Image (cartoon, rainbow, N blue to C red):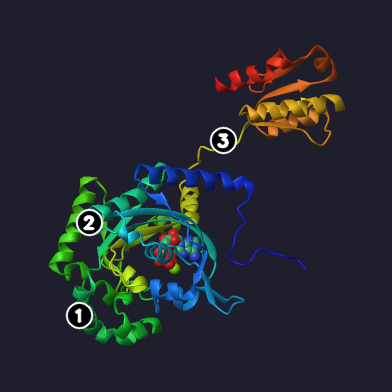
Amino acid sequence: MKVKAPRGTNDILPQDTAKWQYLENVAKNVFKRYNYKEIRTPIFEETGLFQRGIGEGTDIVEKEMYTFEDKGGRSITLRPEGTASVVRSFLENKIYGKAQPNKYFYLGQMFRYERPQSGRYRQFHQLGVEVLGGDSPAIDAEVILLGLEILRELGLEGLEVHLNSVGCPKCRESYKEKLIEYFKPYLEELCSDCQSRYERSPLRILDCKVDKDKNFLAEAPKIHEEICDECGDHFSEVKTFLDLLDIDYILNPKLVRGLDYYTRTAFEIIYKGLGAQDTIFGGGRYDGLAQEIGRRDVPGIGFAMGMERILLTLEEQGIELPIDESIDLFVITIGEEAQRSAFSYLHKLRRAGLKVEMDYLGRSVKGQMKAADRNNASYSIILGEDELQKGVATIRDMKIGDQVEVELKKLVEEMTDRIEN
Ligand code: ATP
Ligand code: MG
């Protein structure tokens, strides 16, 4: 039997993990500056959490979840996203009783049963933030800005910020009626999914991928023009904060979420050069979600960013991350005794903080030189029987090519000095 990785999953090999770590570090530094703390929730949850927290009738819950029964007969689902778990944890751990707001970030694998293609996988990685316990428009602007800041620090350009407000359940009721009225004459022209959405959640017709180019869609009533005064004020403050920071945005009335617990601000950050899967991150406010999951009123907002899509965008824009995988020193040995004594120096040098490697396979000196090159060593030292007897080692600067002899007992000190300078 030939074993392969499951369809839609990817191995991230050592030659690529440095990029992932770089990306994670950039994000973590930004999170620190914005005072967001990491939260780690389980990778699987009771299925009911996602049914409530993402919502029956969404693509994720209807078609994309990895759901199974565990040996105890419980229905378990691999997390398809992070928000529901974070809100569950917030409620379960009664954090609503502490000082607010609480600002979280998370990083990790998500699972969705989708048709794999570029930028779309069955196991993928998101980094995301959630802010719970505050509904100030400044938070909305901060969340968008924070996401953009991560991408800016990676060197990405040409991103579009799409922005909308979906109002609140109250003001959305009359908007929904308007939409139903508006779409009535076009019902036949809608795709079959949208025909069934028509009564239940007409808003979702607006962001349908099948119907997106139909002319009557562009003319549909725009929600940000229909929302109540309170929601309108909130939205204009969000825009004011973004203007203050010189963030350009495109008002996109088709950016909607169909479910009642999504409220007010909705946004997506897009890079057109990615083709069909061009959203790098998206999110919005969900002031009704904690009520849905745990019968508490806790306002919230967040975003989730696809890490694979960030890496694809970096590639697309030809950005090389400044990744240094070189080592400080490669120890070349001649003879068994030298190899043994090198082994203890190796340990001392590593303990002193240097990145050091040696040959384990009994290669020739020439072969070890090549290995030093392959490892991008800044220095190599040669340890042979003569050197051992004299108590010295020859240090070779691999860039310039010059060599000096140092006393073995000063080797660690000498190498640390050289590397630090
Ligand atoms: P899409 O329209 O691409 O299906 P979505 O609305 O399902 O996106 P969200 O649930 O908002 O996406 O997820 C946030 C981000 O996570 C997306 O913008 C994208 O970058 C990433 N993402 C979502 N699904 C996948 C996937 N299957 N593979 C890789 N990345 C994904
Ligand atoms: Mg999707």
Residue type at mark 3 is Asp
For the N terminus, the quadrant is: bottom right
Residue furthest out toward the left: 229
Q: Using the image as rendered, state which of residue 169 and residue 124 is in the foreground.
A: 169
> Crowding at label 1, few (<14), some or many (≥20) Cα neighbours within 10 Å?
some
Q: Residue 317 at x, y = what percent?
A: 45, 47
Which quadrant of the view contains residue 209?
bottom left
Q: Name the residue under label 2.
A: 136
Question: Does residue 407 appear in the picture of this structure?
Answer: yes
The type of residue carrying mark 2 is Ser
Q: Residue 53: which quarter of the image? A: bottom left
In this rendered view, identify the residue nearer to me: 131 or 282. Answer: 131
Q: Residues within 10 Å of mark 2 (few under 14, many from 20)?
A: few
Whether residue 157 is situated above or below residue 76 in the rendered picture: above
Task: Tell me: is circle 1 under 8 Å from ligand 1.
Answer: no
Residue under label 3: 324
Q: In this view, does 97 lie above or below 421?
A: below
* Label 1 secondary element: helix
List the residue tagged with mark 1.
Answer: 178
Residue 339 x/y as whole percent: 81, 28
Residue count near mark 3 (Cα–Cα under 10 Å), binned few <14, some 14–19, many ≥20: few
